[in-house]
Amino acid sequence: MELLRQTGVESSSHASFVDGRWHAGRGSAWSSASPIDGQPLGEVAGLDPSQFSVAVESATAAFHEWRLVPAPVRGELVRRIGDELRAAKPLLAELVTIESGKILQEGLGEVQEMIDICDFAVGLSRQLYGLTMPSERAGHRLMEQWHPLGPVGVISAFNFPVAVWSWNAMLAVVCGNPVLWKPSEKTPLSAVAAMAVAQRAVSAFDSAPPGLLQLVLGDRSIGQTMAENHAIPLVSATGSTAMGKSVSQTVAARLGRSLLELGGNNAAIVMPSADLDLAARAILFSAVGTCGQRCTSMRRLLVHEDVSDSLLAKLRAAWQRIPIGNPLEAGTLVGPLIDRAAFEAMERALDEAADSGGEIEGGRRKTDGVPAGGHYVQPALVRIDPAAAVLQRETFAPILYWMTFRDLDEAIAIQNGVPQGLSSSIFTLNAREAERFLSPAGSDCGLANVNIGTSGAEIGGAFGGEKETGGGRESGSDAWRNYMRRATNTINYSAHLPLAQGIRFEL
Ligand code: UN1
């Protein structure tokens, strides 16, 4: 909240950033509340359709200028945004914790992830390489160029209220594109603060047009409008599979591009050779970190029957000692769920697990030693049959379902036997098992790890998953190509006109 006071956009102007200024929305209003204690944090109002149109026009105008700014100069702006984020890190992390409920360590980690992607994007601004190919025709050159694409729409979720925007926005900006950001309705103030911090750099940068980075608050209708708008060639959406299907179908109907990061249903496989102490620590972080509300959270644990007793003893001991409470307090490892609906979804999943014979440990509401007004829970460990229907869906809560298996092929089949395909891990000291898990016959997920958990990816790799996770790749590696269009160029520098494929076409 201190950061909002510093930025001067608190009180009634908690709002959208459109065409270089803060605007009070004229659309529907709502208040943001802290999941820590349910206290209201501030009122915000979404944009109405005419205000959104102004944002799209401003982004289009910005695109016409920004695409001509040399990419390394665009990178210099991102370097300065990274500097502003470094300076704002403690306050932005605190606000993320207050509004999303993740512990302060994870709030700091989230802002660090923003800084890391800025650094990555700065380097990238000199490496937007296209290929040169040998032409089959004498006196010809064949090459490709990567050009800016146009305004990019970003829809982000509450659980990473600021980092997911920066993965998209910092790449989009070095690639020459403006960005329109619709954050989660549950975390608008973190978005306001992150935008205010970024604007400290943008407003002082001569060649940055006012519509370069915009914040368009609103409910799902803004996301829908974004998906329909032909002036937005790419919509990058993070959230539920249901949301992603709706956005991508709308975008596809106009043959636009979408980049989807949707639900995960991530599993770890523990083999007999595993270092069980290391595995237990990794499982704890991935299963209960962020109160089980990462798309990379570990939801299913597949343990070889030879080591299930010893691993489960370690996990039970750990689960009983998890410090649950106020995420602002040092030492807390698990904060609140985001809201009542999340708590009810957890209860429903546990009821369904029990109905299918699941044995539940933990999972109850916690009221002692935690702030009143929040939804605090003991993370649950649930022994379950691999065929239980509840295992087919993602519940955004700290529930770790566990089951045993006898051989690796069986475990891989269970792991892959769900609609989602985001993240996966194997714990083993056996090189054959590890390589098999990483092979074409192994994990079918976008992320496959050895001897670490399913969550906590670095920004340098391409991040995303297969199947109902949506197929998108954001962040590192060559994910930048999503934000550009490729032009293949053939240049004839000879005085002849040979045709490709040896075709003769003479008058
Ligand atoms: C998400 O939950 O939407 O790999 C993103 C991780 C983080 C990103 C999670 N770096 O857990």
Image (cartoon, helix red, strand yellow):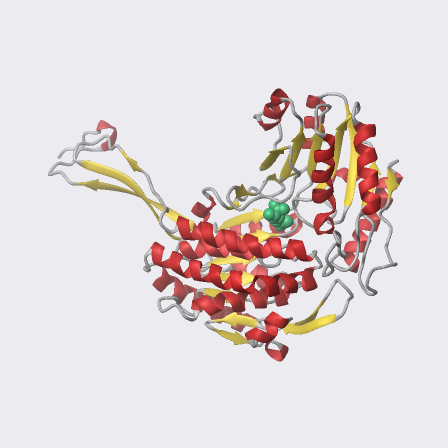
The residue under the point 65% across, 63% down is: 94
Classify residue 403 by image quadrant: top right
Q: Is residue 150 visible?
A: no
The residue under the point 70% across, 27% down is: 274
The residue under the point 63% across, 61% down is: 184
Q: In this view, does 289 lie above or below 391?
A: below
Q: Where is residue 299 in the image (x, y as percent from the top left)?
A: 73, 41
Q: Position of residue 417 (x, y in %)?
A: 69, 32
Q: Is residue 287 left or right of residue 202?
A: right
Classify residue 270 by image quadrant: top right
Q: Where is residue 252 in the image (x, y as percent from the top left)?
A: 52, 49
Using the image as rendered, state which of residue 387 and residue 446 is in the foreground. 446
Q: In this view, does 37 lie above or below 263?
A: below
Q: In this view, does 185 lie above or below 441?
A: below
Q: Which residue lies furthest to the left in this view?
A: 495
Q: Is residue 76 above or below residue 135?
A: below
Classify residue 336 by image quadrant: bottom right
Q: Can residue 182 be seen in this view?
A: yes
The residue under the point 72% across, 39% down is: 281
Indicate the quadrant containing the C terminus: top left, top right, bottom left or bottom right. top left
Q: In this view, does 259 lie to the left or right of 312?
A: left
Q: Residue furthest bottom?
A: 12
Q: Position of residue 233 (x, y in %)?
A: 45, 54
Indicate the quadrant containing the N terminus: top left, top right, bottom left or bottom right. bottom right
Using the image as rendered, state which of residue 208 and residue 140 is in the foreground. 208
Using the image as rendered, state which of residue 129 and residue 47 is in the foreground. 129
Q: Which residue lies furthest to the front in this view?
A: 330
